[in-house]
Image (tube, helix red, strand yellow):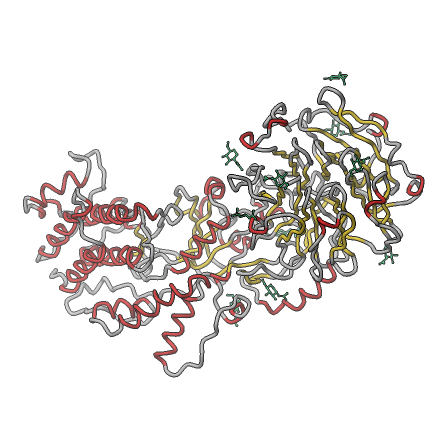
Amino acid sequence: MQTHQTISGFSQFLLLSLLLLLFFKTASGFGSMGPISASFGESGFFCAIDASGKQDVVCWGKNSSESTPSSASLPTSPSFSDIPAMAALSGGEGFLCGILANTSQAYCWSSIAPGIDLVPPTLRTTAYAHIAAGKSHVCAIRGSYYSDHDLGTVDCWEIYETGNNTLSSKQSTLFSDQSISNLAFKKVVSGEGFSCGGIREGGLICWGPNSSNLGVSGVVDNFTALASGKASLCGISEVTGEVQCWGDSDLLAGHPIDTQYVALASGARHFCGIRDDNHGVECWGIFNSSLVPKGQGFVAIASSDFTTCGIREDDLLLECWAANATSSQKPEYDPPLELCSPGLCSPGFCGVGKFAFNVSVLNEVDLTSLCVRNDLTICSPCGSNCSEGYFLSSSCTQHADRVCTACSLCQNSTCRDICGLQAPPEMKSKLWHHIWRLVIIFGSCALGFLLISISWCFLPRLTTSRKEEGTKKQFKSCIGKPELEADNNEDSEAPLSVVPCPGVAQVFRLSELKDATNGFKEFNEVGRGSYGFVYKAVLAEGQQVAVKRANAATIIHTNSRDFEMELEVLCKIRHCNIVNLLGYCSEMGERLLVYEYMPHGTLYDHLHSGLSPLNWGFRLKIAMQAAKGIEYLHKEFVPPIVHRDVKTSNILLDSEWGARIADFGLLTSNDKDLGGDLESDVYNFGIVLLEILSGRKAYDRDYTPPSIVEWALPLIKQNKAAAIIDRYVTLPRNVEPLLKLADIAGLAVKEKPNERPTMSDIASWLEHIVKDGLTL
Ligand SMILES: *[C@@H]1O[C@H](CO)[C@@H](O)[C@H](O)[C@H]1NC(C)=O
Ligand SMILES: *[C@@H]1O[C@H](CO)[C@@H](O)[C@H](O)[C@H]1NC(C)=O
Ligand SMILES: *[C@@H]1O[C@H](CO)[C@@H](O)[C@H](O)[C@H]1NC(C)=O
Ligand SMILES: *[C@@H]1O[C@H](CO)[C@@H](O)[C@H](O)[C@H]1NC(C)=O
Ligand SMILES: *[C@@H]1O[C@H](CO)[C@@H](O)[C@H](O)[C@H]1NC(C)=O
Ligand SMILES: *[C@@H]1O[C@H](CO)[C@@H](O)[C@H](O)[C@H]1NC(C)=O
Ligand SMILES: *[C@@H]1O[C@H](CO)[C@@H](O)[C@H](O)[C@H]1NC(C)=O
Ligand SMILES: *[C@@H]1O[C@H](CO)[C@@H](O)[C@H](O)[C@H]1NC(C)=O
Ligand SMILES: *[C@@H]1O[C@H](CO)[C@@H](O)[C@H](O)[C@H]1NC(C)=O
Ligand SMILES: *[C@@H]1O[C@H](CO)[C@@H](O)[C@H](O)[C@H]1NC(C)=O
């Protein structure tokens, strides 16, 4: 029902986006608290709360290859497994602090000895609601993290290095300022020699030896988030959502104005923030803007000196980027592949403009909550807009953020303007209507590919219609104008596939596909491959589809941008002899592709596994249609799409018994070897033809030799092709067409790749055979 929500709710979101500013409270950065945090300094490291439901902490340090001499004495991959479960994290210099998930007590650790608590013994039993680590001190607000009954007063302690490269701590006198001892705080941040806090009654106050350098005084505004650098402070105004900064003026030059943010993080010489509208990241200070991720939304970010890492909103995976380019152009920190908590667990309801994270989208059977207690929820602000190149395809609900979809998948006028696609001019005639429809359908597949698409869809098609008949018929049958090919002496049981090729991809919600597959249950499984499982699904409207669900290995080896690139290509692939993509879903780390359902199964099953053996009329047409499908992949794309796995189990049969090519390996495309790869598709298609002709498997130990090519090729060469013809199917009176098929197969499996015909040759030869027909 809510598969494709329109942008009509857009204006509501603008209102909501204003409202949500009033409710957002988590933030990350040096000295501020969040689900991901970083420690500063040479031995800096990152930690994040994972999405295991246990609030366990995952940490990662610098890559050993990037280690500087001074950090060489540190373990390159410290064992962080001793760190207890955490409710929230905040990083200082060389150490990190958190609030324990079970008791709300503070816990601080360094990368050298993560198992050793650096909180002074006198404060270890106190419960805290908020914690902020600075360069060498920590301030925390008393109260229980999960309850509303905070005391609100602040305790501070110092963490300092002892002689032998270890850290020690003591309750602080430097930060025990009289002016704050009786104040109750909502939140605190810490920097180098200062801490600042938002007071319950309103206003901002800073204390500590270096606090006067910031120039914060008499500030009465309230802030939804605060982040501090070593000598600077930025906050997000509760009223305007805009960023206000104090301190080190060089650093803060160019801080954003008129833009609303929901979270901040600060590095040594830069700040980054998460925009409230599209959840994209923007940075200011000294940094290289080309390294900041574009078009990717984040739920939380944290910065060490020169690296920022964030938790991506679409899959909860970690991504890091450098503030300035290293020699290798890579960030110093390589995060682990872990799903991370999208926010902090908190009691109570989420409020307006926020959604409660619904753990069911992670599809982990045993997981009922990301929080250690089921009464806690993770509330995150709803986005109101999408990054450039994306359009809003689904609105925010109480349990899911708005969904952004790549413009390459924009289908109609609702997203065309946002995606900057041109609307068609007034149609003059049916023909022009038709042509424009094509241009729009194909052109809108990808804005960036618009020109290519036009030259691909528009020009060839326009000229094809003036070309000789055969091609014209193929063209027509592919855009839904049924026109049977010459049917004079055709096998009447085997009509050509005239199923119209569908439009472009839709965006599905994960919940919808889960329902459609009975929760991805085994009995819905129709196949499996290296990519993952394929399920038969019935959509709410009753339409049958096939859902291909990526397994963890596939997700790990392709990032979401690769996936989008693959989608862009898949979206452009439209042909009546291809299993076309209908849509996709990429929510919460899942990658699901929705394809047309092929009710008659695979060619393999018909030839070899006891499904109705196909008669010769069917077999010839299937051969021709499969050839056309592969020819289309080879011919219509620049660079050509190489299938790489042409075999009878990848040739499926649609409801009209038309052949459809499935399972082409796009991600592995490699331009260099294209020539050879095209020819290997031809070779493998030759094997398919031999299987069709003989009913024998490609490799079968019951035969000598077991390889179908070694068995059949000598016979074909000796003009004894009749000996390989499948005897379990009634022979036609005239076997000539079958012998021709054998000859084509023989050419296709030639040893020297350059002697093999092209798929176009094969397709047109097969077309002639089918046209001439069989005499049964
Ligand atoms: C545009 O496409 C979306 C998603 O497929 C659909 O929900 C919506 O109804 C369409 N709008 C119009 C005006 O056709
Ligand atoms: C970190 O090291 C791993 C393995 O040694 C390597 O694969 C990865 O590319 C490195 N990352 C960076 C950012 O250098
Ligand atoms: C809380 O967790 C810590 C670390 O896992 C553990 O040492 C401690 O005993 C726990 N305390 C309670 C009250 O469960
Ligand atoms: C050196 O470290 C050990 C623990 O590893 C500690 O007991 C000792 O007091 C430290 N020495 C100094 C001088 O800080
Ligand atoms: C105050 O800042 C200076 C640098 O400006 C630094 O050297 C000093 O250590 C800071 N004070 C504290 C207490 O951190
Ligand atoms: C700050 O918050 C307090 C308490 O919520 C409120 O009374 C005060 O008016 C707010 N100040 C501003 C400037 O909005
Ligand atoms: C910014 O990063 C890009 C990409 O790594 C690099 O090509 C460029 O030289 C960098 N610019 C500066 C000013 O360092
Ligand atoms: C980035 O710049 C800072 C200061 O300009 C420098 O200290 C640091 O080493 C640089 N980091 C990288 C990774 O180049
Ligand atoms: C949404 O974002 C796009 C850029 O991605 C921008 O052009 C558009 O103006 C934004 N819409 C609103 C309502 O802010
Ligand atoms: C989470 O989503 C599922 C559907 O995917 C829904 O049945 C469930 O009610 C949602 N959870 C909550 C707390 O709303």
Quadrant location of the N terminus? Answer: bottom right
The part of the image, by quadrant, that contains residue 256 is: bottom right
Residue in the image at 67% along x and 49% along y:
285
| Quadrant assignment for the C terminus | bottom left
Residue located 42% across and 70% down the image = 440
What residue is shown at x 65% (from left), y 31% (from top)?
43
- Where residue 171 appears, as percent x and y from the top left, is 85, 29
Residue 570 picture location, percent across and down: 40, 56
Report whether residue 606 is seen. Answer: no
Q: Is residue 48 visible?
A: yes
Q: Is residue 165 above or below residue 297?
A: above
Compared with 398, 411 (above or below) is below
* x and y percentages locating residue 487 in the rendered image: 19, 69
| Looking at the image, residue 29 lies above or below residue 61 | below
Name the side, left or right, on which 184 lies relative to 85: right
Residue at 53% from the left image edge and 31% from the top image edge:
65
Foreground of the two, 622 or 392: 392
Name the one closer to the observer, 390 or 156: 156
